Amino acid sequence: MPGSARPRSRAYSGLPRWVYVPAALGALFVLVPFVGILTRVDWLHFVALITSDSSLAALGLSLETALASTVACLVLGVPMALVLARGPVRGRRWLRSLVLLPLVLPPVVGGLALLYTFGRLGFVGRWLDVFGVQLAFTTTAVVMAQTFVSLPFLVVSLEGALRTAGGRYEAVAATLGAAPSHVFWRVTLPLVLPGLASGLVLSFARSLGEFGATLTFAGSLQGVTRTLPLEVYLQREVDPDAAVALALVLVVVAALVVGLAYGRRAAGAVAA
Amino acid sequence: MSFRLRAALADRGLDAGLHVESGETVAVLGPNGAGKSTLFALAAGLVRADEGSAELDGRVLFDTKSGAWVPPHARGVALLAQEPLLFPHLTVLENVAFGPRAGGASRASARATAERWLREVDAAELADRRPTQLSGGQARRVAVARALAAEPSLLLLDEPFAALDAGAAPALRRLLRRVLAGRTAVIITHEALDAHLLAERVVVLEGGRIAEQGPTAALLERPRSHFAAGLSGLNFVRGRTTAPARLAVAGLGEVFGVVPSEAGEAPATGEDAVAVFRPADVAVYASSSGLGASAPGADGRGGQDSMEEPPHGSPRNAWRAVVAELEPRGAQVRVHARAGDAAIVADLTPAAAAELDLAPGAAVVLVAKAAAVTVYAA
């Protein structure tokens, strides 16, 4: 409701009392481990630990690649969601299942699939090699691995938003003389902006945390393919204090991203 | 310079044609599910026909024979849906400017056009509002302005008064009457009043087929379909003439009436014909004691003398019937009865209905004077 304060519900909720027990347990299960990390942080050397060369390189690489793969998800995923939600596609169910496959696949399997496709010996990679293009174990490979696992997040949330919105506004826009592209930019996209935003946030967060596919397809080269999660895993063996400090950085970045996006969505919901 | 459509769509059981002269407004009437909205979707290009064609001002919109098909945005056909469907992310002014902008107008000129149309629908002061801040009536007015700002060659209005609160309908009706004058338009409605006020011609669609069509006043006065008769509030039976003003109706028997004085309306003997009569002209008698207790029609024309005996002297119709339902309608009670295969309604005063102790299932005799029944060719 526009203008009304945040609804402090005084209405009867109808929830059975016992659901609060498992709900609280679940919340604790998610939150308590963060306390675990906080208790292990070496606050004395915290700044030094996260500003070491390898840490800064990993953080920078992570932000760069996650951003790049989010853009890739945007460019590829929006049309995919549109076609899945609205296109006159046969075998829509099959297509959707295939698109969602990376969501349920272990990332390491995705990495292997990418390696045997785009690697030097892969059937596409072999052909690319002829032109002097090598993808595996490059920063591009990191972005590809992240895009591979993150794309379904964007497609799923945007397709849901498109289905919920329905096509009625688009039909009206068309009868007002708007060509399909005009309708897309001026009607469809603005209407599903909240869904698109949450899809992008999910994709970015998933890219930021990507580990298995990246390690398999891109390896772990400092400054080239070693993103923050890989650095955390590596340091865990060598320097646990550094690993914990970097893990905390990841937690903070992830929380910032989700918090920012959620805050904007809440504001948007009030304005809409 | 006109609109002509003929299309079949097996999916929706539609096989109908529509013709609108340039500058003419046609009302499409029909029960729910008759295919009215499908007809609009076909005209606007939102649904493809299995078979058929359409033309607007000499341009082919679609033709299944040649495979021609013009997409919705290039048709010049604006569709005003049952809901206003104003774009929620745009202001009222931006909504109305949407059509001109889509047509390639500059920002400034689209804005000027939108402001002009908002003034035309008395909504200039709403320009900066969001659609969520509008009342139902305001949103409809803005939707009308938005459709007209797109300068369509053909305007389709799908039940513009549906779900509109009673207070807002008269103003919108006046507005539409003003803006539809001289405009090529088709309006779907359930109200005889809208057809009378807004349309020169009426098309009645029943079960996906055109049941009848003609000039509004003539058609609603002499309906030849159940639906149109219902809109005009008339009883309607269909049969075959056995004499100039005598109609044999299956399941009901003979119906006596009078033929209209207009030339060409009187049916020839043996021809299909219809009989119409007003519910107020039907008197209801209890049938328990033969034709004993009785009550006059609601308009009192049954007269006091008919309280004991049904009227004799003048020719009349008397049908045995069973009460199906009683429906209070303001100062009257409408009795829905079944006489044989025919559904007949009669309007009584509440006092008369109570005196007859009417209830669903009660056996009654319905009486209508022949002078009150009009018989004409179907």
Image (spheres, coloured by chain):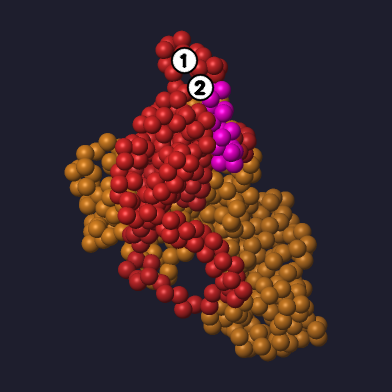
- x then y, percent, for residue A237: 48, 41
- Most foreground residue, A204 or B369: A204
In the image, what residue type sits under mark 1?
Answer: Leu
Colour of the chain lettered A: red
Please give the residue where the numbered disc 2 appears in the rendered image.
A118
Residue B241 falls in image quadrant: bottom right
In the image, is B193 to the left or to the right of B105? Answer: right
Q: What colour do you see for chain B? A: orange
Q: As rendered, which of B271 and B4 lies closer to the eye?
A: B4
User: Crowdedness of circle 2 by 10 Å Cα count: few (<14), some, many (20+)?
Assistant: many
Residue B75 in picture, x, y percent from top left: 40, 36
Q: Which residues are magenta?
A: A101-119
Q: Residue at x 80, y 84 (%)?
A: B288
**Residue shown at 28% from the left, 42% from the top:** B100
- Residue B305 lies, with reference to residue A112, above or below; the image says below
| Residue at the spot of label 1 | A128
